[in-house]
Image: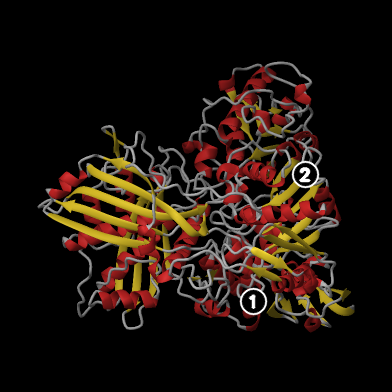
Amino acid sequence: MKPKNPFKLDGALPLSEKALEALNHLEPSRRDFLKAAGVMMIGIGVGAATADAQNPLNPSGNVDATQIDSWVAVGADESITVFAGKAELGTGMRTLQTQLAAEELSVPVENITLVLCRTGVTPNQGLTVGSLSTMTQFGAGGLRVALDTARDALYQLAAQWLNVSTDQLVVTDGVFSISGGDPSYTVSYGQLVEGRRFNLPVNSKAVPNNPSTWKVLGQSVPRVDIPSKAKGVFQYVQKVRLPGMRHGRVVRPPALGAHVQSIDKSVLNDLAGNPQVIQINDYVGVVADTEWHAILAASALATGITWSAGDAFPNQADLYTYMTQQPSRDSLTVNSGDVDQVMASATKVITAQYRYPYQMHGALASSCAVADVRGGVGQAATVRVWSATQGVYNMRTVLSNLLRIPTANIEVVFVEGSGCYGHNGADPVTHDAALLSQAIGRPVRVQYSRRDEMTGGEHYGHPMVSNEKVGLDANGTIIAWDYVNTLMQRGEGAAIGNAPGNGIPGSLAGFPTAQVIPTTTPPNNPTTYNNFSNNVPSYVTGSINGVSFGTGAVMSQRVLNKIVASPLWTAWLRSPDRLQNTFAHESFMDEIAASLGADPIEYRLRHLSDPRFINVIKTVAQAASWVTRPSPRNITPFSQPGEGRGFSCVLYEGVDGYCATVAEVFVDVQTGIIKVTKVTTGIDTGPVINPDGLRNQMEGQVIQGISRTVYEEVKFDRATSVITSKDWVSYPVLKFGDVIPEINTVLINNLNAPVTGAGETTITTVAAAIGNAVFDATGVRLWQIPFTKENFLAAKAAQGN
Amino acid sequence: MSTYSLQVNGQSVDVSVDDPATPLLYVLEQNFQLNGPRFGCGLAQCGSCTVLMDGKPIRSCITPIEFADRHSITSLEGLRALEGLPNPGALHPIQEAFVKHQALQCGYCVSGPIMYGYAFVRDNANPTRADIENALSGLLCRCCAHSRMIDAIQSYAKENAR
């Protein structure tokens, strides 16, 4: 099932003259796209052709997602063009959406041309975040229902053409024939539609193809983008080149929060490339004719700027104490109202605190964007940007606010960057390119330096302090669970509220940043259940007004969330808060089981009620040859000292896929070095869309999870307000040559459940599984990420071990 | 302005550059419009800018253009041409192995593993898995497709040894 023409992807061409031309004259409207696809504008179905049908774009450049023509176009040449709003971030969404279209329309994968994420062209599907894209596209408002509506319309047309009822039709590769009839009596999609519009609203009740009959979905269809990426011709956003384009670099304040006091531009006097300085309040950038000249100019300019002192930072060593002492914005996710009372009646109370640091996305590519802003500000100005943003429509609104240009004049084109894992530098660098281009009225490309990316580009993942407390009855059963999590936020990215000041460039340019407003009264009890951040442990009932939404049995429960102001910029990082909360809950569950001498999996199962969850756990335990016994292990003459195994599980986001993981480790207790030697991880995300693609995601998340658990922490210096993690030496991550575990992925193909996501599910379980394995091996409990050798040895000493 | 003679993916070209310290990567990007070598860190810490110079992997982000004068440069795009294989636009066998193993996610880093893997297998027949991991030591893949990349290189090595 190998695509015939993998090089013909949108965005995958080498930069020929023709490609340059195409970039310079990118389709200004949907109409041109349809023309290019051989599609004429003639109404069929309900209603005749109207003047409006000639121009499906309304003047604001929005796409009407209620019309199937906004999602799919069938050309007279049998080509099928699909317009979708979930970006390719390296996880395979391009292939998955192509598979979905091929399946629902019963055509080969290579017949589908997929257009991704372009304002005015693709439907606005919000942001590509949170492991939600698969669920969205297969759900009631996604691509799937539009395709199924189109499929149903094609059946109706074919029934008329062939003069039979729809249930007598069979369709193969886009050609209808009559079941049991003359096989030469056929009609194709192209003949039926003849390149016209469907002119039909999306039918939200259109029925999906049954997973038990899937031919394209459910198969390991190879990723459509891998050949051109391996060949080196794939065009990332870093490789967008426009005629007349200049190169920009930013000069960020060396200390966070420092203000420009003066700029001596004479430092640029002798430099080549006609460097131009752009300053907007504390926002400073420089543009020049080539990238190298821009780099030289930026480093010279940095020596010519006098900055004030930066913001006050806490001591890194005191970060977690500092966090819990700040005024907080409080909310409750669940509150049964009886936790204090039941806790007081408990035979035994156990508490623990877990701590999670700031971490980076650490995109491998320094972020890059190209912007072409003409005409200054206001109604006459126009903007085109090429960006690896997670949301082209949000970006359009942010740029409108940042540049003071109406959204109708702004076009945002998604072009892949490197894997992003959340809100990395892709959005900020787009704002940078737009600000610099607006200042000079010419196209500008900006690619960050590694230091720009790590200290003044990306927004870090939230640090968290998790305070866990349970009460046990005489049998060791949990009867009350009380959880308080404190996390830090700053800005969260300009897509929040479409406010430029919620991102770094807009803030420097003078736009206000949303503040964390502390609450002054106790939070209200929740009225709806939302476990999107996995702050509710799996083992409680998750009850709201007497109705259980959770996966567990513990009825007395309270989850209190506290948000405090962060000195460093923050936003979503792969499995945002779900990973931090799950590290706490799943490590704590292990601690409770160990205190009772219980097997950690058996103890979990005692408190779970959800059969799908229980099935995943048992399946993974079996695949990992889990031996029932308590932790830590007994060292016997037959066992290798330092070896251990640990377990962790989650129902991701409370609704988005079940996962269980067993990690096996070797710990050198003398040096403190932790090696993860084997990981068995299983998933039930409903029907499996692409088995090999899913395994690739799970494997990547296991290794990235090890990196984040064992290596990663953003470092900063209180005295200078400087972030000192500025490159891959000062922010170490797992590299080639480090120990890579054997990974056993277990797929549970659950055809009876809805399709859910897998982009962040597995990584959510990894940290706790490793920590529990270290405890199993050594008896040392690790309450704080990362598990560096220094942190292990400190924990070992503190625990008298 | 100085002129440098480069042989890039089999084609001899003279380029004029005003600063002899200009990293080779920018010349390959701007003068040759190559998409294979990519800027990741500019510090020789990640490997995504890797090209072969006279057959040896180097980090083009820190290699001044003057050091490349009169040398042969090969990027991902040119691996087939380097071996004189027909149809230079097609995939080289090591690239085919990466496709077969679906050995990447975003793919931005892939110049590093492919170029170091290619050079290592050329010089070391029948490498073990540990040998390959060692040869790739220090390279970064942030999507963490490490296992598949090592599998792909090993399967290329086996194919190559036939």
Q: Identify the residue under disc 1.
A: B44
Tell me the crowding category of disc 2: few under 14, some 14 to 19, or many 20 or more residues within 10 angstroms, Cα based: some
B60 vs A14, nearest the viewer: B60
Chain hosting mark 1: B
Closer to the eye: label 2 or 1? 2
Q: Amino acid at mark 2?
A: Val
Q: Amino acid at mark 1?
A: Ala
Q: Identify the residue under disc 2.
A: A377
In the picture, measured across the screen, residue A308 lies left or right of residue A742, that is: right
Question: Please, what secondary structure does the residue beneath circle 1 have?
Answer: loop
Chain hosting mark 2: A
Q: Are marks 2 and 1 in contact (CB under 8 Å)?
A: no
Q: Position of residue A38 (x, y in %)?
A: 79, 34
In the picture, measured across the screen, residue A208 lies left or right of residue B3, that is: left
Say yes or no: labels 2 and 1 on the same chain: no
Q: Position of residue A464 (x, y in %)?
A: 39, 58
Q: What colouring style does the render use?
A: secondary structure
What residue lies at 52% left-to-right and 49% top-to-bottom? A690
Tell me the crowding category of disc 1: few under 14, some 14 to 19, or many 20 or more residues within 10 angstroms, Cα based: many
What residue lies at 77% left-to-right and 19% top-to-bottom? A50
What residue lies at 53% left-to-right and 51% top-to-bottom? A492
Q: Position of residue A15 (x, y in %)?
A: 80, 58
Q: Is residue A660 visible?
A: no
Label 2 to label 1, Cα distance in Å? 41 Å
A90 vs A452, nearest the viewer: A452
Please count the marks in the image. Answer: 2
Q: Is residue A473 visible?
A: yes
A430 vs A92, nearest the viewer: A430
